[in-house]
Amino acid sequence: MTLTDHFLHAVGVLSHSVFAGAGASAAAVIVLTIRPRWERIKYLCAGNIEPEVAAPPVLTVRYRSHDAAAAQHAQVAQ
């Protein structure tokens, strides 16, 4: 084998290692994303329906104040 063959082999091994590492990282991210919600996923896949959840009060107040500000702006514009 020539020096070029050794170099190309090293580049091939390195590229395979990079792709394997990227695949392992992607799989880890998927697992870490799904694991906290796994019970909910199983519950929904079993055909159960989640009860409706009200919007958090902070968001409700925020959007109400935004609507009030928009209404005030509309009155000023008229």
Image (cartoon, grey):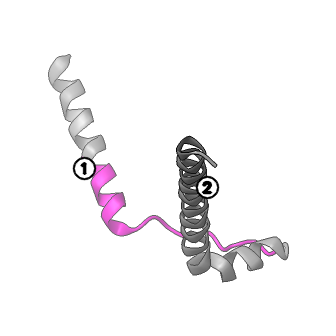
Q: CA distance from mark 1 to mark 2?
A: 55 Å
Tell me if residue 30 comes above or below residue 15 in the rendering. Answer: below
- Per the image, is 59 magenta? yes
Tell me if residue 29 comes above or below residue 77 in the rendering. Answer: below
Please name the residue shown 68% across and 83% down the image. 39
Furthest residue in direction right, as rendered: 47
Tell me if residue 5 comes above or below residue 32 in the rendering. Answer: above
Furthest residue in direction front, as rendered: 1
What type is the residue that disc 2 sits on? His
List the residue tagged with mark 1: 65
Instruction: Pick the residue in front: 14 or 50.
Output: 14
Q: Which residues are magenta?
A: 48-65
Query: The C terminus lies in which quarter of the figure?
Result: top left
Please name the residue shown 55% across and 41% down the image. 4
List the residue tagged with mark 2: 16
In the image, residue 60 lies at what x, y percent?
Answer: 36, 59
In the image, residue 72 lies at what x, y percent?
Answer: 19, 34
Name the element at disc 1: helix
Contact (Cβ within 8 Å) of mark 1 with mark 2: no
Residue 59 lies in what quarter of the image?
A: bottom left
In the image, residue 14 lies at what x, y percent?
Answer: 53, 55
* Left or right: residue 48 compared with residue 15: right
